[in-house]
Amino acid sequence: MKKGPMLYEGKAKQVFATDDPDLLIQHFKDDATAFDGTKKSTIASKGVVNNAISSHMFSLLAEQGVPNHFVEKLSDREMLIKALKMIQVEVIMRNVAAGSICKRYGIEEGRVFDEPILELYYKSDPHHDPLMNTEHVVQFDLCSLETLDEISGYARRINVLMREFFRGINVTLVDFKLEFGMAGDQLLLGDEISPDTCRFWDLKTGEKLDKDRFRFDLGRVEEVYQEMLSRVTGA
Ligand code: TMP
Ligand code: ASP
């Protein structure tokens, strides 16, 4: 597999072409941003941790019948992925109240929802990723209603599978973000699944084991990324 030019650079990742037009290389950086990119720094070895955790989660989900873009882990910071045409929607699943849902609706952090809440956000930095509903997604031609139904089905199923997995390593899966894309006419889960894109609380102590430690200057940032790496991979 020959690595080609960089096609895209985001806040935490880079994407490179390969000699196969259907395959790309996703490279995980240590760069960390929060609050719409207004807070910026690096978290040592975050790229290595997020690549390893994402590789593990994508493999697990594929085994459980959730199709995704992961092909193989190539190195510490790189994975081979299928090329996707990304749907510009961020899907958030929430089991426990934290972050923006608390701020937006004035509900207390830690409230456990009877049923997981699925939210849709428009993936658009200039518009600050606004919350949207099904009608916005369809009317703005981001994807069809049928595709959105399929996405919601996968998101709920992924939540069940991931909650179970994380409970097994003494972690409460509070919430997480998913992004999907099309490989031809096949819908696939894409992006990453990591402490950047999920909220993880220790099951017993409630300690935050995710990017909130960076967002809110809680300290022990690198340490909790390493802690999640060892819990997820058993290393
Ligand atoms: P929120 O509470 O800030 O809306 O975040 C919900 C979840 O989504 C949380 O696990 C962090 C993740 N997330 C991202 O992955 N990217 C983002 O840009 C934001 C705002 C949240
Ligand atoms: N990474 C996102 C940003 O910089 C937000 C976040 O994860 O909190 O806007």
Image: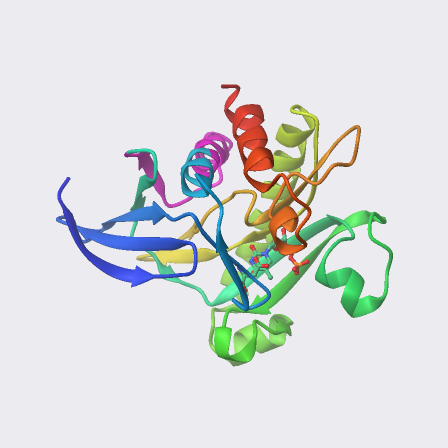
Residue drawn at (51%, 69%) of the image: 123
Residue drawn at (47%, 67%) of the image: 88
Seen from the viewer's position, the closer of residues 35 and 105 is 35
Residue 141 is one of the magenta-drawn residues: no
Seen from the viewer's position, the closer of residues 145 and 125 is 125
Q: Image check: 144 left or right of 219?
A: left
Please provide the residue range marked out in magenta. 53-74
Q: Image check: 94 left or right of 75?
A: right
Residue 41 in the image, given as x and y percentages of width and height: 49, 56
Residue at far top of view = 235
| Coloring applied to the structure | rainbow
How many marks are shown on the rendered structure?
0
The quadrant where residue 162 appears: top right
Q: Quadrant of the N terminus?
A: top left
Seen from the viewer's position, the closer of residues 221 and 86 is 221
Quadrant of ligand 1: it is bottom right
Residue 151 in the image, given as x and y percentages of width and height: 54, 55
Seen from the viewer's position, the closer of residues 133 and 57 is 57
Residue 65 is one of the magenta-drawn residues: yes
The quadrant where residue 74 appears: top left
Q: Image check: 58 left or right of 23?
A: right
Residue drawn at (69%, 28%) of the image: 167
Residue 65 in the image, given as x and y percentages of width and height: 48, 36
Q: Is residue 2 above or below residue 101?
A: above
Q: Image check: 111 left or right of 144?
A: right
Residue 171 in the image, given as x and y percentages of width and height: 69, 32
